[in-house]
């Protein structure tokens, strides 16, 4: 073992290096989440975190389970394919707790012109009117019912 | 160093290595990422510029005011200068559009959102893996991990990203990932009254997107960027940028 007599400093250097590697591994295992790299160069649990967020729009299937009368009125009109929350807004809270969370009352004078105000960029086949000339300030639901907007004699809300 | 010290260090190294390799993956929900490859179909002739999608996205995803995960642009292409359209998008079309100043020429609306590219530049430049393409094709941001370095905002060729002023992290359209994993459609598709926006699952053989792609001429934004965008546009005018 005489040939290693002068190599003590090399052994000490190797020991320091090994200690550094161990410290690095330890710190990295604390700082990098366990799921990092599960699917790629990102934290795999991020998918579950993002998917776990609560929803605010319930979806029209949820509305139709309770409001089947509105659905029956709507399905024969031009608004059959317009989902409920397109006009009524996000109502997942109302679907979760129907008694204490009431959807806000809509103002037909403001609501309908959002889509049906005349604009040159809208498709030609889309029904649109210049609202000031069309109704002289009357609310749209004076003549049209939003769930089935065709004008019919004896239309009910 | 003596032989005794070396014999003590080797098991310690092995123990540390096992600790690094340890960790059980989280149990996955019923939703299987391998069965989906999400995209979006935008039918430009159907868009009426009502702004429902912008309002729905803001209320569904708590988007701060003045920033947009999705927005609508109005293009006016004059008869005399078809290569330089006039584009406006007041407040991202959150409250719709005023009447067109010049009804002549060609006027149309173009909804825009993150294209969820299969070869997205923004995920390539992220230094920490905070933004990534999920196994089902949605480009997402891990806001816990994001440094807010703004590199991805620069890298996106469509301008779809912004820095949330409250959290100082990058934000963008998540394709309502928390909804599509529950079997629902996105908030903007749910709120679109004309069906100009349709969620597409390219791995589902029953999805109507396949029939649409066979029978219609669709385009993606900025195809020269080779991002392999999965937001398909029907009726896209050549002047749209």
Image: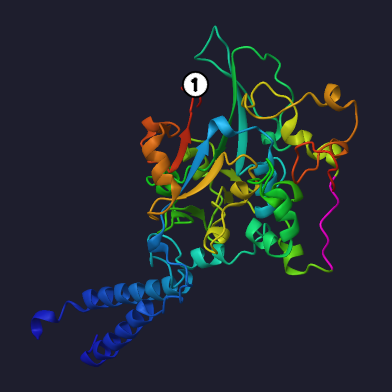
Q: Residue furthest top?
A: B80
Q: Is residue B5 magenta?
A: no
Give the residue displayed 58% in from the left and 67% down from the top: A52
- Report if residue A60 is visible in the image: yes
Residue A151: give x, y in percent of width and height: 79, 36
SS state under label 1: loop
Main SS, magenta residues: loop
Category of crowding for the residue at label 1, using alpha-carbon neighbours closer than 10 angstroms: few (below 14), some (14–19), many (at least 20)? few
Q: Residue furthest front?
A: A153
Residue B184: give x, y in percent of width and height: 57, 59
Give the residue displayed 71% in from the left and 60% down from the top: A68
Residue B111: give x, y in percent of width and height: 58, 35
- Magenta stretch bounds: A100-106
Instruction: In the rendered view, tell whether residue B241 sits above or below residue B171.
Output: above
Residue B56: give x, y in percent of width and height: 68, 48
Left-right relation of A44 to A147: left
Q: Residue furthest bottom?
A: B4
Quadrant (top left/top right/bottom left/bottom right) for the N terminus of chain A: bottom left
Task: List the residue tagged with mark 1.
Answer: B239
Q: Nearer the viewer, residue B117 or A44?
A: B117
Left-right relation of B53 to B143: right
- Report if residue B165 is visible in the image: no
Image quarter of residue A4: bottom left
Instruction: In the rendered view, tell whether residue B54 sits above or below residue B74.
Output: below
How many labels were placed on the picture? 1
Image quarter of residue A57: bottom right
């Amino acid at each position: 073992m005489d040939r290693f007599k002068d190599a003590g400093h090399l052994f000490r250097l190797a020991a320091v290096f090994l200690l550094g590697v161990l410290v690095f591994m330890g710190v990295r295992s604390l700082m990098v989440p366990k799921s990092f790299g599960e699917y790629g160069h990102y934290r795999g649990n991020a998918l579950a975190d993002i998917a776990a967020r609560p929803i605010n729009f319930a979806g029209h299937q949820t509305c139709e389970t309770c409001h089947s009368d509105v659905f029956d009125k709507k399905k024969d009109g031009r608004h059959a394919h317009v989902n409920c929350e397109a006009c009524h807004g996000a109502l997942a809270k109302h679907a979760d707790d129907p008694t204490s969370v009431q959807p806000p009352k809509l103002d037909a004078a403001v609501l309908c012109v959002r889509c049906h105000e005349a604009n040159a960029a809208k498709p030609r086949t889309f029904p649109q009117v210049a609202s000031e000339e069309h109704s002289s300030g009357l609310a749209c639901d004076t003549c049209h019912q939003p769930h089935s907007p065709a004008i019919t004699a004896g239309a009910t809300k | 160093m003596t032989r005794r010290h070396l014999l003590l260090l080797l098991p310690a190294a092995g123990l540390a290595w096992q600790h690094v390799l340890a960790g059980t993956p989280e149990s996955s929900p019923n939703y299987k990422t391998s069965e989906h490859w999400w995209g979006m179909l935008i039918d430009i002739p159907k868009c009426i510029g009502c702004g429902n999608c912008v309002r729905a996205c803001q209320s569904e995803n708590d988007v701060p005011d003045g920033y947009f995960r999705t927005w609508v642009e109005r293009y006016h292409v004059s008869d005399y200068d078809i290569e330089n359209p006039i584009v406006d998008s007041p407040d991202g079309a959150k409250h719709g559009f005023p009447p067109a100043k010049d009804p002549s020429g060609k006027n149309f609306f173009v909804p825009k959102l993150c294209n969820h590219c299969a070869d997205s530049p923004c995920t390539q430049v992220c230094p920490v893996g905070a933004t990534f393409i999920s196994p089902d094709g949605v480009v997402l941001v891990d806001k816990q991990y994001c440094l807010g370095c703004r590199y991805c905002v620069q890298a996106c060729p469509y301008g779809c990203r912004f820095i949330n002023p409250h959290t100082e992290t990058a934000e963008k359209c998540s394709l309502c990932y928390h909804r599509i994993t529950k079997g629902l459609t996105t908030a903007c598709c749910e709120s679109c009254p004309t069906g100009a926006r349709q969620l597409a699952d390219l791995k589902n053989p029953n999805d109507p997107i396949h029939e649409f792609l066979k029978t219609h001429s669709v385009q993606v934004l900025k195809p020269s960027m080779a991002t392999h965008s999965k937001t398909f546009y029907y009726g896209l005018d050549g002047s749209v940028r």
